């Protein structure tokens, strides 16, 4: 994947923000999946205008012929691609520790690059918290958001969680800002349910409250 290809996919300017615990972020499509962006600095209006432009571009595109979708585990060889994707997809600069964590063997099945016709177009990443899986990021580049790649990536993670035995994963959880109803509906279509509203979950954005969404994972004979 050349630098030039990444440059033409988005003109999102680089924004810097650090979290002790990286928040959940989703970049999908309003028509086919969902669309959710957290604004983590003072340029809220600029970010809002940018996301509106992305939504217009995505919704105005004609349906494209079906292509080949594939996935790959993260490695030291492709982690640079994940960094580049995240710099385009999210208004957050993730720490080096974040990228070290998503390379760990215990999350190999839950941290995946998404390819469309052999071009890396997104990624989904989770972390293990005892017997639960926490979804940290899910993002697809704007020109590819009309192909339900986000849904396919999420279903892949759900299936991997149902097959995982050491430990046996009991649920998948994530947070969604309460102003992002589209993102909530996207996850609810995939079996997630609202567990609670957590007050003041976000420190640098408003509204600060977040929905905690959870999906109970069924295993083997339970299915």
Image (tube, rainbow, N blue to C red):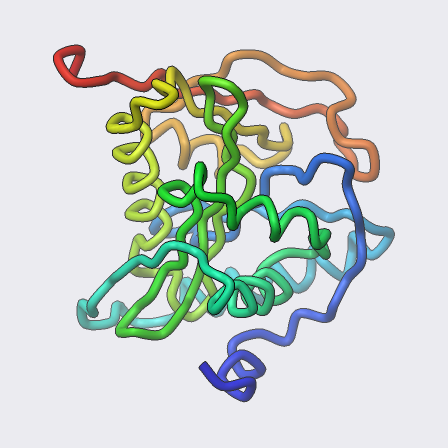
Image coordinates of residue 44 in percent, x first then y, are 79, 52
Is 33 in front, or is 90?
Answer: 90
x 12%, y 12%: residue: 221
Q: Please give left or right for residue 128 compared with residue 47 in the image.
A: left
Q: Is residue 85 above or below residue 24?
A: below
x 57%, y 74%: residue: 10
Q: Please give left or right for residue 11 compared with residue 154 in the image.
A: right
Q: Is residue 44 above or below residue 83?
A: above
Image coordinates of residue 101 in percent, x first then y, are 59, 44
Q: Please give left or right for residue 187 compared with residue 103 in the image.
A: left
Q: Quadrant of residue 47?
A: bottom right
x 36%, y 71%: residue: 61
Image coordinates of residue 195 in percent, x first then y, are 51, 12
x 53%, y 45%: residue: 137
- Count of marks, rendered view: 0
Quarter of the image for the C terminus: give it: top left
Is 62 in front, or is 92?
Answer: 92
Quarter of the image for the N terminus: give it: bottom left
Q: Is residue 223 above or below residue 201?
A: above
Residue most extreme to the left: 221
Image coordinates of residue 74 in percent, x first then y, are 44, 56
Is 166 in front, or is 65?
Answer: 166
């Amino acid at each position: 994947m050349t630098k030039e290809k990444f440059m033409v996919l988005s003109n999102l300017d680089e924004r810097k923000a650090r979290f002790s615990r990286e928040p959940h972020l989703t970049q999908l499509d309003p028509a086919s999946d969902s669309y959710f962006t957290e604004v983590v600095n003072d340029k809220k209006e600029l970010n809002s205008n940018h996301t509106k432009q992305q939504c217009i571009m995505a919704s105005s595109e004609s349906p494209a012929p079906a292509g080949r979708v594939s996935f790959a585990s993260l490695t030291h060889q492709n982690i640079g691609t994940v960094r580049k994707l995240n710099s385009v997809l999210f208004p957050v600069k993730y720490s080096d520790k974040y990228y070290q964590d998503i390379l760990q063997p215990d999350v190999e099945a839950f941290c995946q690059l998404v390819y469309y016709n052999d071009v890396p177009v997104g990624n989904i990443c989770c972390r293990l918290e005892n017997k639960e899986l926490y979804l940290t990021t899910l993002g697809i580049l704007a020109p590819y958001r009309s192909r339900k790649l986000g849904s396919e990536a999420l279903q892949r993670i759900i299936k991997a969680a149902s097959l995982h035995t050491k430990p046996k994963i009991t649920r998948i959880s994530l947070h969604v800002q309460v102003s992002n109803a589209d993102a909530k509906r996207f996850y609810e279509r995939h079996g997630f349910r609202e567990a609670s509203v957590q007050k003041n979950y976000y420190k640098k954005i408003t509204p600060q409250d977040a929905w905690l969404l959870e999906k109970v994972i069924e295993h083997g004979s339970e299915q």
